[in-house]
Image (cartoon, helix red, strand yellow):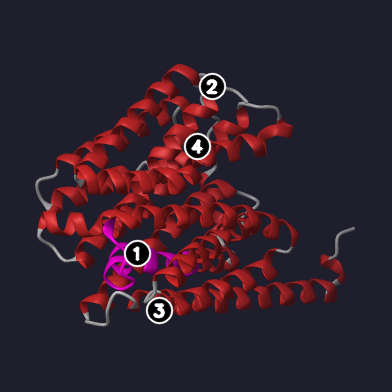
């Protein structure tokens, strides 16, 4: 594998860390700015909404630039956003820094995955793309727990300085190691937009919003839930995030295998399992060992849904998948924003730090209902095709 993939993985590691690390630092950030924990949780919502709003426009912009140049621009924006977050004297400027950073997310992974595949022989593309995404996976296993530890020991601002440093490392690596490829041919935006006429594409995107949103309804408030309900110390939150990250890695790998074998049955089972884990978490979060086990299961079931959800969108937008893929990346983050907001609402209403788990369970159950509806539409289409000989392939 070429060294350029290492530079892409470093960038992915930094982006993944800055997205998720705030969840482990909510109490510290809330105290520093003098806001409530739900208000601090909206820093996750702001980031997620920025990804949602920026994924499609930045991806379209990427069709007009050389990929290396776009990646360099994205890393510069990423560094500036994290520096602004580290320096922010007010909550409003902190939110601005988070949104600025978020605009790099969707385009980096969209363009980076295409570039990674182009750097190797056709029979090694999947491995090259997986290697780049290893940076995102490791961000959850190593970056987020270490960022939480640094923030608790040296102040949360130190974490964002470190993440900005990761951005500099990614920038230098991309500049030095990624080859300058020809400017890509223009994309037919009309063809890309046409796939959204398919209702199955919208059902798949809605499943992504609700299903992955279920994970973040709970995960956004994992730090106060574990410290104030389960009785863990603030220092233990870092290790709990490692446990979540290990579940993420295992779930992501297994979800990919399940999706290749039987996509819709996998979605049914995983979304049902996720809803059950979130419902049970309301009870298990009151004792340390059951809470730790459920944190692992939340990561495993939550991220096992990612490959089948992404594959469902791509399968239904096969004619022009680029924009649909970017929009679905935005959908994951729209789910994050919606869930963090709803979780904050139930906490503010006085229902306690375990209430977001019920919100997450209901969101996952709603995603399961949409998956069942989508599967029924598939069967109706197959039946209609079988009943019309002129639609049969010759």
Q: Quadrant of residue 113?
A: top right
Q: Nearer the viewer, mark 3 or mark 2?
A: 3
The picture places residue 358, in percent across and down from the top left corner, at 40, 79
133 and 63: which one is in front?
A: 133
Q: Does the residue at mark 4 contact the one at mark 1 (Cβ under 8 Å)?
A: no
Q: Secondary structure at mark 2?
A: loop
Magenta region: 209-234
How far apart in space, not on screen, are marks 4 and 1 (Cα)? 32 Å
Q: Which mark is residue 372?
A: none
Q: Which mark is residue 111?
A: 4
Q: Which mark is residue 222?
A: 1
Q: Nearer the viewer, mark 4 or mark 2?
A: 4
**3 or 1: tag closer to the N-terminus:** 1
Please give the name of the residue rendered at 64% of the width and 72% of the height, measured from the top-left corner.
Answer: 269
How far apart in space, not on screen, are marks 3 and 4 (Cα)? 39 Å
Q: Which mark is residue 282?
A: 3
Q: Which mark is residue 182?
A: 2
**3 or 2: tag closer to the N-terminus:** 2
Residue 97 visible to an observer of this rendering: no
The picture places residue 266, in percent across and down from the top left corner, at 67, 67
Q: Nearer the viewer, mark 1 or mark 2?
A: 1
Q: Dot 2, crowdedness within 10 Å: few (<14), some or many (≥20)?
A: few
Please give the name of the residue rendered at 57% of the width and 73% of the height, measured from the top-left corner.
Answer: 273
Apparent side of residue 217 relative to residue 193 in the rendered image (left or right): left
Q: Secondary structure at mark 1?
A: helix
Q: Secondary structure at mark 3?
A: helix
How far apart in space, not on screen, are marks 4 and 2 (Cα)? 14 Å
């Amino acid at each position: 594998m070429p060294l350029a993939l290492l530079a892409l993985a470093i960038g992915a590691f930094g982006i993944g860390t800055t997205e998720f690390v705030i969840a482990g630092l909510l109490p510290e950030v809330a105290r520093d700015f003098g806001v409530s924990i739900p208000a601090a949780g909206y820093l996750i919502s702001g980031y997620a909404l920025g990804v949602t709003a920026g994924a499609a426009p930045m991806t379209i912009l990427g069709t007009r630039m050389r990929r290396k140049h776009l990646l360099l621009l994205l890393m510069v924006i990423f560094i500036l956003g994290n520096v602004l977050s580290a320096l922010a004297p007010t909550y409003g400027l902190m939110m601005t820094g988070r949104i600025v950073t978020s605009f790099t997310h969707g385009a980096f992974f969209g363009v980076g995955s295409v570039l990674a595949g182009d750097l190797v022989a056709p029979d090694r593309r999947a491995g090259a793309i997986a290697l780049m995404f290893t940076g995102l996976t490791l961000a959850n296993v190593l970056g987020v727990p270490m960022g939480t530890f640094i923030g608790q020991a040296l102040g949360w601002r130190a974490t964002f300085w470190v993440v900005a440093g990761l951005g500099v490392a990614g920038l230098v690596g991309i500049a030095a190691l990624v080859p300058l490829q020809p400017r890509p041919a223009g994309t037919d935006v009309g063809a890309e937009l046409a796939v959204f006429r398919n209702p199955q594409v919208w059902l798949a995107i809605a499943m992504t919003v609700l299903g992955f949103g279920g994970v973040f309804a709970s995960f956004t408030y994992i730090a106060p839930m574990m410290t104030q309900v389960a009785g863990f110390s603030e220092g233990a939150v870092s290790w709990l995030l490692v446990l979540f990250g290990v579940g993420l890695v295992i779930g992501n790998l297994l979800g990919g295998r399940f999706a290749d074998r039987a996509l819709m049955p996998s979605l049914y089972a995983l979304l049902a399992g996720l809803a059950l884990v979130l419902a049970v978490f309301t009870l298990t979060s009151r004792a340390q060992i059951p809470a730790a086990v459920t944190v692992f299961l939340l990561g495993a079931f939550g991220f096992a849904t990612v490959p089948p959800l992404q594959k469902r969108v791509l399968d239904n937008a096969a004619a022009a998948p680029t924009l649909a893929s970017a929009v679905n990346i935005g959908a994951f983050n729209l789910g994050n924003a919606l869930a963090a907001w709803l979780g904050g609402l139930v906490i503010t209403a006085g229902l306690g730090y375990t209430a977001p788990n019920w919100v997450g369970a209901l969101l996952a159950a709603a995603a399961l209902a949409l998956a069942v509806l989508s599967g029924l539409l598939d069967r109706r289409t197959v039946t209609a095709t079988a009943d019309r000989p002129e639609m049969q392939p010759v």
